Structure formats: structure tokens, C-alpha cells
Amino acid sequence: TAATVGIGGVMGALIAVPVAGMALSPIWQKDKFEAVLLGKVDEFPAGEFVKVVLVPGTDEPGAYVRKKVAYVRQNKNKGDDKFALEGQEDFSVISNICMHLGCPVQASSQGFVCPCHGGSYTKDGSRQAGPPVRPLDRYLWERRGDELWAVALYSLTNDGKRVGTRDPGQHTSGPLKWLYPFHPA
């Protein structure tokens, strides 16, 4: 009886450990963000969003699959972007991925609009109306000489605090944020 129970326990562990590893490993895997050139600093006029296609690792096969789009604006004043992090006030670099289901948003004179389900965002990317659950994601940027580079992607809570990157539709504020897996930031 003891041998049967022992063998059964070993067999159960051999099945359960890989399954648990596959289920839990995405929680601790960090997405590697490759720095991407946004453009020359003088290409971004003050107060206007410019659509930029981010193509990381163009020398790698399959890089076209990882293309992303960002909207870049040189801010006229430090208070133009209420969600700007300290040291990030000169430019706003906002992702074009809607925080409802991941459709691409379009810039408008009023802010950003998602054509899929009617999500609406203000000019600083905060949720205004519709089904999105949080503000648009942001890119950390840095100046390298006269060039502007995107160096990381992050998500925001509804009050503008930086959190780790989350998928569209995942809450970052309120009690609903506990329904989603833990993401080390």
C-alpha cells in the first residue's frame, strides 16, 4: 500500500509540476522591450501629436510582427500632460492600443477615439467615455543627442500612477484589479 501511494504521489507530481509551471510562468516573465527610435526631436511640433511607427530590431527576422504605433507630442508647458512622470514632462509618448480590447485608437482634435467600440480618451490619454477600463499606456522616452527614443512601456492607474504593463481590458485601479494575475513591475 505504501509503495502504491508513493508511486502515485511521484506520478502526480510529474504531471502537476509542469502544468503549474506553464500556468504560472507568465506571471514572472518580463517582456523584453527593445529601445526604438521615435525620430529627431525637431520632428515633433509643440502641441501636436505625430503618429510614429515603432519597428524594433529591424535586422531580426519577424520584426515586422512586433511593429507598434505611438503618438508623440512635444508639450508646450510642463502641465500639458497631467499623467507625465517626473523627468518626462517635455514629451508625451502614448500607445495607440485601446484599453478595452486592444483595437488601434485614432487621434482626433478632442483626444483619441477607438473606432471598434466607441472608447474615448482625452488629449492626455485618460479614459473619457465608453468601455475602456483605464488610461492609454505610455512609453518612457529618453533623448539621445537630437533623437528621441522609446525605452519602455508602462500602464497607468486611473489616477495616473505608473504600474507594470498590463494587457488591454485589465483593470489597474479599484477592487477589480485583484481579479487579474499579479505582475511584478
Image (cartoon, rainbow, N blue to C red):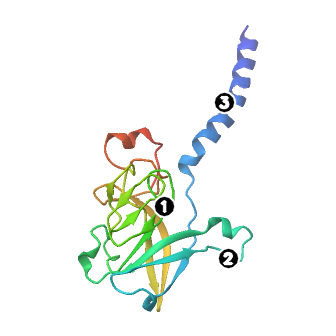
Q: Nearer the viewer, residue 177 or 123?
A: 123
Left or right position of 165 against 56: left
Q: In which quarter of the image is residue 141?
A: bottom left
What SS does tag 3 mark? helix
In primary-sequence order, the first of circles 1 and 2 is: 2
- Nearer to us of marks 3 and 1 is 1
- Proximity of marks 3 and 1: CB atoms separated by less than 8 Å: no
Left or right position of 118 against 20: left
Q: Distance between the residues labelled 1 and 2?
A: 21 Å
| Count of labels in the image | 3
Q: Residue 185, how many percent across, how many down?
A: 44, 56
Picture layout, residue 181 above or below residue 66: above
| Residue drawn at point x = 44 percent, y = 47 percent | 170
- Proximity of marks 1 and 2: CB atoms separated by less than 8 Å: no
Q: Would you name the residue on which mark 3 appears?
A: 16
What SS does tag 2 mark? loop
Q: Nearer the viewer, residue 185 or 1?
A: 185
Q: Would you name the residue on which mark 2 appears?
A: 58
Picture layout, residue 29 above or below residue 85: above
Q: Would you name the residue on which mark 1 appears?
A: 97
In the image, what residue type sits under mark 2? Answer: Thr
What SS does tag 1 mark? loop
